[in-house]
Amino acid sequence: MAYYKIADCITSYTPIYPLLEKQMAAYRIETSKKPDITLSITRAFCEQKQRENPHLTAEQCEYIFAGSEFYKKLILHGGFFLHASAVEVDQRAYLFSARSGTGKSTHTKLWQKYFGADRALIINDDKPAIKIEDHRCMVYGTPFSGKTDENLNRCAPLQGICMIERGKENKIWRIEVGEAIPLLFQQTLLPKNQSVIDKLFSMIDTVLRQVPIYRMQCTISEEAAMLAYETMRGEEQ
């Protein structure tokens, strides 16, 4: 059994296929501690899921369903996934969320173009983990980064979350909690177990109380990245 530290949780699992093994390599650790999370995906399970989803390969099924199992168990350890692209600048994490195809990844790439890839780091391009630690909201990279392999094994305090949409001009504004609630819930998965749902709701409530939430209409331009950064960096948690 191999061990990994993902979102500060010791996770035991031995990847079956090369795709997930590669994704998880940067998170591997040596430890004698008891794991917080144990993943139970098997080859037979992956093959069954591949038959049910013929557009996927068995290794893609492992990647998807291992991520799903990790997410469900992460909630019990004070964290959850948000469908977002997470960029870190100057030890602060900024999350950009949107419906698929809207351009959240394109936007964070503009941050790298504006700041340089050595200063603007893509923590995770699809499923960063948000954890509540010592009453602070932290963002962690995870191996589960959607269709890309862009993720880093690092964490940073969450400075802000921005819901983006395409626009003809660049504008950004902070929104109230009532408007933010449905937007956040649209970008995470709801568990079926009521007690687990309650834990998720509690974490999202903490995020809403501590972290500024924004909406942004933007073009594909470095000016959009600059406006987002200048607006979001000025807010204190």
Image (cartoon, rainbow, N blue to C red):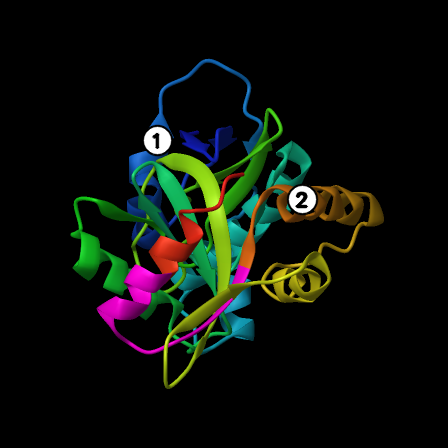
Q: Secondary structure at mark 1?
A: strand
Q: Which residue is mark 2?
A: 209
Callout 2: few (<14), some (14-19), or many (20+) C-alpha neighbours within 10 Å?
few
The answer to whether residue 37 shows anywhere in this view is yes
Q: Where are the magenta residues, as a range?
A: 214-227
Q: Between tags 2 and 1, which lies in front?
A: 2
Viewer-proximal residue, 78 or 3?
78
Residue drawn 29% across and 37% down?
26
Residue drawn 71% across and 46% down?
205
Reply above or below: 147 against 25. Answer: below
Q: Which mark is residue 28?
A: 1
Q: Does 217 appear in magenta?
A: yes
Viewer-proximal residue, 227 or 152?
227
User: Residue 48: where, in percent of width, then height?
Assistant: 55, 64
User: Residue 46: where, in percent of width, then height?
Assistant: 50, 58
User: Residue 122: where, in percent of width, then height?
Assistant: 30, 51
The quadrant the C terminus occupies is top right
Viewer-proximal residue, 78 or 210?
210
Residue 78, image quadrant: top right
Residue 197 placement, left or right of 145? right
Nearest to N terminus: mark 2 or mark 1: 1
Do residues under tags 2 and 1 come within 8 Å of each other at their CB atoms? Answer: no
Viewer-proximal residue, 114 or 51?
114
Instruction: Give the spatial CA distance, label 2 vs label 1.
Output: 34 Å
Residue drawn 53% across and 61% down?
214
The answer to whether residue 44 shows anywhere in this view is no
